[in-house]
Amino acid sequence: MSRELLEKLETIEDLPTMPQTAKKVLDILNRPDFSFAELVSVISKDMNITASILRLANSALYSPRNEIQNLTQALSFLGANNIKNLVVALSTKVLFENFKASLLIHKVWEHSVAVAIYARIVSLKINKKVSEETFLMGMLHDIGVIIMNLYIENYEIMISEIYGSNESLYKKEKELFALTHSEVGAKLAEIWKLPEIYKDTILHHHDYTKSAHKDYCILIDYADNVISRKGINVSNYYDENKIKEIEKFLNIDEETAQEIESIFEEVYNSEKEIFALK
Ligand SMILES: [Fe+2]
Ligand SMILES: [Fe+2]
């Protein structure tokens, strides 16, 4: 099964579902009359997510003026949209934990966390307008890899062959399966009923120029390449020309790049344990 996976995906019974807490939060937010108290009550039942939100809310990713001590404070400081994105992003961890044994899954998770943090920091520096969505987009951009690995025969063999090499996973998928993790991830976003903007960004994260939401997608494409250049990815492939091109386009000069880099190192190293797989 390769290309036909796209059509079949919807009918696969054991397809990973959106984790519970995330689902409940999305349901609440989809109602026009939702209350903060309701939101707090649902999230606070998940102690891991609550603790992680508080840690992240107090980190350089959000830089509050005063320490945020509880969910109600976090919600009023960050707003419902940021909280929703954090809850969904943090809940995806459960999906990865279900396949914890695999080295591949660990690498993809580590990569997704790093891309999410990087994209968020870049957006705060360059384009605050889009910053609320970028963290979750980064977290989900490669989710298709997990799905392909579950349902496509020989996928894991392919991964182990390019692991640590300079070969592009995306190109290899096209060659061998005529299907990419971008397409599969976008389909999953659709099945999970995530907003269209997520589907689009996941679909085009290897070529932001095709995206209908370039402002967002360019940040994910950029963060993806920079993080891969750091070696935090399955293969070490990255596109230096694209990095340069995007930096020029977004006016990221050397000084800004350095600043982004140092905030990333700070957040990534100090908050890493939140994201450690069990
Ligand atoms: Fe990717
Ligand atoms: Fe990626």
Image (spheres, rainbow, N blue to C red):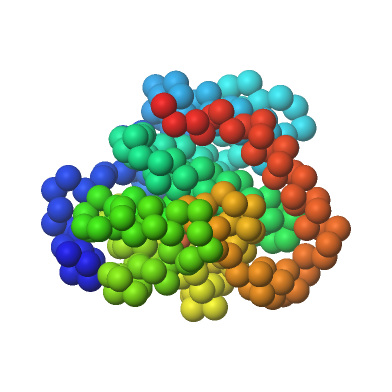
Any part of residue 77 in sight: no
Give the x, y percent position of residue 20: 31, 35
The image shows a total of numbered marks equal to 0
Could you say which is closer to the camera, residue 86 or residue 228? 228
Could you say which is closer to the camera, residue 35 or residue 253? 253
In what quadrant of the picture does the N terminus appear? Answer: bottom left
* Res. 41 image quadrant: top left
Residue at horizontal 26%, vertical 44%?
Answer: 17
- Looking at the image, residue 190 lies above or below residue 35: below
Residue located farthest toward the right when viewing the structure as drawn: 255
Residue located farthest toward the bottom when viewing the structure as drawn: 210
Could you say which is closer to the camera, residue 242 or residue 66? 242
- Looking at the image, residue 145 lies above or below residue 29: below
Could you say which is closer to the camera, residue 213 or residue 251? 251
Left or right of 205 on screen, residue 254: right
Give the x, y percent position of residue 200: 43, 67
Any part of residue 257 in sight: yes
Residue at horizontal 59%, vertical 52%?
Answer: 231
- Looking at the image, residue 101 lies above or below residue 127: above
Residue at horizontal 69%, vertical 61%?
Answer: 127
In what quadrant of the picture does the C terminus appear? Answer: top left
Residue at horizontal 59%, vertical 33%?
Answer: 272
Give the x, y percent position of residue 148: 29, 57
Give the x, y percent position of residue 167: 48, 66
Left or right of 188 on screen, residue 202: right
